[in-house]
Image: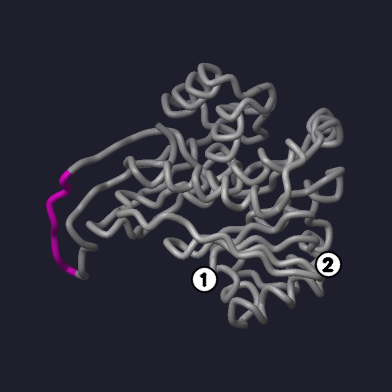
Amino acid sequence: MDFILKAPAFVKEDSEMFIEKINTLPGGSALNFAVNLTRLGIRTGLLTRLGNDGYGKLILDKLNQIGVDTTHCININAKTGMAFISVDDYGKRSIYSFPGANAKLNLKKEEIDYIKSAKLIHLAGVYWEIAWEVAKHASKLSFSPGPLLSSYGIDKLKKVIKKSEFLFLNQREVNILTNYSLDEGSQLLLDEGASKVIVTLGNAGAKLYTKDNIIIAPTEKIKALDSTGAGDAFAAGFIFKYLQDEDSKESLEFANQVASSCVKFLGAIA
């Protein structure tokens, strides 16, 4: 569950600030991606762990309403994962994450079979210990490590990166993961075996790196209300176009449009 707190600015140490608005809704990188891709018309399923609590039920109800396959969204005796996200007047975020039930995710045989049966697996919001367990069974892998998983560095994630057909990062995550600048870090990830490194650049758009080419797609500059989930929406938009056999430039441009729509409201999914 995401708890989105809209405030004029980030609170400083030993101080207090009134929240202007609060929004509580299902979230998490994998869920955001699945919801966006389902709404674009692709048959999508989510593999996760939820708590036996009201939040777990609310999330399942929302996913079923949207049409995401929840066969492998399993409730266990734990609290549902939560993120407490403060958003300032510029759309910037500060996030406290509690993984909850997802920390107990272990793949069952039927879930491995489910992974093997998928045309594409998008891997997001997991611990590095389970990332390879998922990646090694995927016929085609899309990987979005986010800032927390990126902080483990290339050596920890080397096998997953090598398996990745699509590696989605923002500019800061490239630096966290590689300790290099955008272009140098992206090239290093290609050298490690990623087929395509796709980097979001906020209002500057996005860049796609391959061994042979760099493609740049600018985007319309808009005032973001909340950037939560924008990267997940971008990845869903790109994969949607890829599944339609569109070229990389058109896929980037469409992904920018999907991400731009996401930042206009408070929270990752409406």
Label 1 sits on a secondary structure element that is helix
Mark sitting on residue 172: 1
Residue 36 placement (x, y as % from top left): 55, 35
- Which of 109 and 190 lies nearest the eye of the viewer? 190
Say if 145 sits above or below 80 in the image: below
Mark sitting on residue 152: none
Residue type of the residue flagged with mark 1: Arg
Q: In the rendered view, does 188 fall on the left or right side of 23?
A: right
Q: Which residues are magenta?
A: 14-20
Residue 148: in sight, yes or no? no
Say if 207 sits above or below 138 in the image: below
Residue 46 placement (x, y as % from top left): 65, 32
Q: Which residue is mark 2?
A: 193
- Which of 239 and 4 lies nearest the eye of the viewer? 239
- Which of 27 and 100 lies nearest the eye of the viewer? 27
Label 2 sits on a secondary structure element that is loop
Q: Residue at x 73, y 41 (%)?
A: 106
Report which quarter residue 246 is drawn in.
Answer: top right
Say if 54 sits above or below 1 in the image: above
Q: Residue at x 35, y 60 (%)?
A: 94
Report which quarter residue 193 is drawn in.
Answer: bottom right
Say if 56 sits above or below 125 in the image: above
Report which quarter residue 128 is drawn in.
Answer: bottom right
Q: Residue at x 20, y 69 (%)?
A: 12
Q: Quadrant of the N terminus?
A: top left
Q: Quadrant of the C terminus?
A: top left
Residue 125 placement (x, y as % from top left): 59, 49
Residue 89 placement (x, y as % from top left): 22, 57
